[in-house]
Amino acid sequence: MNHMKALVLVLATACISCAALSIQKPICKGLPDCYQLYNKLYYDGALPVADVAYGPCPIANVMACTFKDHDGNFIIRLLPKYNVAPDTAHFNLLHETCHVAHWNEELEDHGPVFQKCMHRLADIGAFESIW
């Protein structure tokens, strides 16, 4: 079972790079690279630095999550089990950028401010060829 988890993690990490084969998707070497690219393309570099990786989330029943460590640094985790497909990983990472961009701006995790961010990303083409 541990070998299977390791294989899924390796495949998931490799697949995010495979997404670069699509002309419409940004070219990313891995999740941190994608976060930096999305920050530049869709947020004019305004997002804070974040530790972005595949791994477990402290929140149950999610595909990805954003939280802060004890020092106040952002951490984004995509669960390998749910993010094997490159399109899914890209979508979930973009979703998490909205959480970072609007951290503590509303009580609901997916309230109107978050929804406006996701709609803005859709309007400017961030999800082209993903959905």
Image (spheres, rainbow, N blue to C red):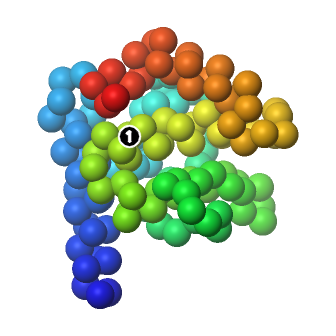
Q: Position of residue 14 (x, y in %)?
A: 23, 56
Along the viewing direction, whichever of 72 and 61 lies nearer the viewer: 61
Can you tell which quarter of the image residue 71 is in? bottom right
Along the viewing direction, whichever of 26 and 49 lies nearer the viewer: 26
Q: Position of residue 122 (x, y in %)?
A: 47, 19
Residue drawn at (25%, 85%) of the image: 3
For residue 51, say whether it is visible: no
Residue drawn at (38%, 40%) of the image: 90
- Judged from the image, the secondary structure of the residue bearing numbered disc 1 is helix
Q: How would you rate the neighbour count of disc 1 (Cα within 10 Å): few for under 14, some for 14-19, many for 20 or more?
A: many
Residue drawn at (56%, 42%) of the image: 96
From this view, report whether residue 1 is shown above or below residue 127.
below
For residue 40, say whether it is visible: yes
- 35 sits left or right of 61 in the view: left
Q: Position of residue 98 (x, y in %)?
A: 61, 33
Q: Position of residue 66 (x, y in %)?
A: 63, 52
Check the image and name the residue furthest to the left. Answer: 21
Q: Which residue is mark 1?
A: 90
Q: Amino acid at mark 1?
A: His
